[in-house]
Image (tube, coloured by chain):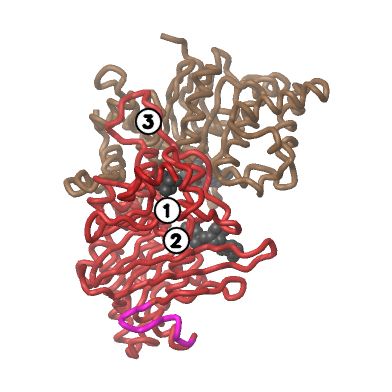
Amino acid sequence: MSKNLIEVEGLKKYFNVGKGKVLKAVDNINFTIREGETLGMVGESGCGKTTAGRTVLRLYEPTAGSVKYNGTDIYKLPPGKMKAMRRDMQMIFQDPYASLNPRFTVSDIIGEALDIHGMAGSRAERKKRIEELLDMVGLNHDHATRYPHEFSGGQRQRIGIARSLAVNPKFIVCDEPISALDVSIQAQVVNLLKELQDRLGLTYLFIAHDLSMVKHISDRVAVMYLGKMVELAESEELYANPIHPYTKSLLSAIPVPDPEVEANKKRIHLHDELGSPIYAAGEKTNDSDFELVEVSKGHFVAKQYA
Amino acid sequence: MMEPILQVKDLHVSFFVKGGEVQAVRGMNFEVGKGETVAIVGESGSGKSVTAQSIMRLIPTPPSRVKKGEIIFQGQNLLDKSMKQMETIRGKDIGMIFQDPMTSLNPTIKVGKQITEVLIKHQKMSAAEAKEQGIEMLKLVGIKNAEARFNQYPHEFSGGMRQRVMIAIALACRPALLIADEPTTALDVTIQAQIMEVMQDMQQKLGTSIILITHDLGVVAGMCDRVIVMYAGEVVETGTRWEIFKNPQHPYTKGLLRSMPRLDQKKGEPLIPIIGTPPDLIKPPVGCPFTARCSEAMHVCEQIDPGATEFSETHMARCWNLHSMAKEVQFV
Ligand SMILES: Nc1ncnc2c1ncn2[C@@H]1O[C@H](COP(=O)(O)OP(=O)(O)O)[C@@H](O)[C@H]1O
Ligand SMILES: Nc1ncnc2c1ncn2[C@@H]1O[C@H](COP(=O)(O)OP(=O)(O)O)[C@@H](O)[C@H]1O
Ligand code: SF4
Ligand SMILES: [Mg+2]
Ligand SMILES: [Mg+2]
């Protein structure tokens, strides 16, 4: 088995929301991702997925905890070394349109990523690399001179992917990369991400709320709930034997494109509205309830439900 | 087919823009029966919202215009109505909910007032009656503490709860038809499932006909009676949900179904995407609009629009390969 590329321990990211309150967006989560693996992360809006992804990449400074990349604690790196490390760790965003500068051509957008890390080389090399990246994500060379608004949603996501790949990353946080896309186009992007993973040996943290797509792309899946990780297992296992009531409720809500399945489906309701991750400053959360316990090989669930 | 409450006949709608005429809807034909739920499914840009907005007479004119067709609602052509008449029909007889409830809820007015306004205007209720009915509606769509929630502003509600409020407003006057345009696209799966349940429940209680618009076929398998698959401004296939999900005929419908991951799919099995993107409707293809993306396309597809082939009283698709003379046309 391959080694752990990412090791996250006791990670917390709290936001001060004023009036003596803190929002525990990510609260003491632990996980590892093996080299070449895809770890899926699912959970309702606001449960802390984006915050977790950004904190793992140190786009946010953590409140507590450590993230090791290849054995190195990235939070201990001085700025210069962190910048070099950023090449290895990239992010793909949900909204391809909002994340692309509308005044830049595709070539500018991809080129900028190369320039930031001093990887552009000569003009000819830069152009060649941009064309190589366009090929990689299935865009034409003559797309290089066009602007983001001239592309469809799926094509824009390809531009975002090309930009992330420009610096030869090893690890990519994909933050809902397909949520804004039509179902028919989602499959194109997911296949592309898989293909690139096989070809380039990439490791993914794949954040999404579409559980059927997450199952498809992930080796293992982590379920987040109000800033906590409540369950983690191999994807087949998680979908076959969910333990945490929240996981069960999420799975039962997946719409299945088959009237027969739908007619026999039992929805599991948890509650109408989620609780809140906002606490008074200094108030302790009961960490031990949310400690993950291994109930069968590789299947972890919050202690409360173990 | 049940008695139709809505008949859309040969509807053509275009946008006249700088670059030319965008033919957003190109000859839509469909019916909605009394108490029936009909799904309109298709990719972004296929003309679903323009169809819905044309029914409601809400498309911006200019730049757009209904060029041709009839929209018969309860026996009357809505295209002949004055704007004033339409205003009454919209609040009272046809309700509508959109993807983003924040765009249709007034952020400065308490939720309760937004419901009672409709009731007072269209049902001529007194303020007290309207309040009672309004609270009743909030309860009906599953909002707890309805009395207290009645006095709150939209921003005090979560996305899913706001969508419930929209449903309550849209159904307050017990309209005969509800048009829901991607009502759950922006919501989490659990909330989406709840909203679908609320709509089904309301339909059973009130007997409303529903047009449910979505780009996600998965969402409609559980609740619609019939499905209309739209592509490039046309109906390419229509059938009962059993016909569409269990026996799809058009390559586009089959492609949509294949591109979705199935929970029973084997590990490592790649998805089968639909390649490419829909055609530009400024220059819509003369033949089958799906030609450029269709793996079964033949020479004739590009040149001549395929007519309808009927498989049952309810099941129809437009594709040359399904044509009874398919073998012969291959050699045209
Ligand atoms: N910069 C921030 N300041 C304050 N609160 C934030 C910030 N970013 C996110 N949050 C809050 O943290 C919680 C988790 O948000 P997020 O990570 O975006 O969730 P998800 O990606 O799962 O939808 C939410 O309650 C959100 O409002
Ligand atoms: N304001 C507009 N100006 C020009 N074209 C428009 C406008 N609104 C919609 N269209 C065009 O009409 C077509 C159908 O749009 P729409 O009905 O919104 O699609 P859907 O709801 O199926 O995603 C699209 O090709 C779109 O580009
Ligand atoms: S008519 Fe031709 S191009 Fe169109 S869907 Fe059928 S086979 Fe494909
Ligand atoms: Mg997020
Ligand atoms: Mg639309």
Dot 3 falls on which chain?
Answer: A
**Would you place residue B5 above or below residue A130 in this image?**
below
Could you tell me which chain the residue with mark 2 belongs to?
A: B
Q: From the image, state the color of chain A.
A: brown
Helix, strand or loop under label 3: helix
Amino acid type for the residue under numbered disc 2: Lys
**Quarter of the figure with the C terminus of chain A:** top left
Quote the CA–CA distance across marks 1 and 3.
23 Å
Q: Are marks 2 and 1 in contact (CB under 8 Å)?
A: yes
The amino acid type of the residue labelled 1 equals: Gly
Q: Please name the amino acid that badge 3 sits on.
A: His
Residue behind mark 1: B42
Question: Looking at the picture, do discs 3 and 2 lie on one chain?
Answer: no
Question: Residue drawn 30% across and 50% down?
Answer: B324
Residue B54 lies in the magenta stretch: no
Which label number is shown at residue B48? 2
Compared across the picture, whether B315 is left or right of B157 comes to left
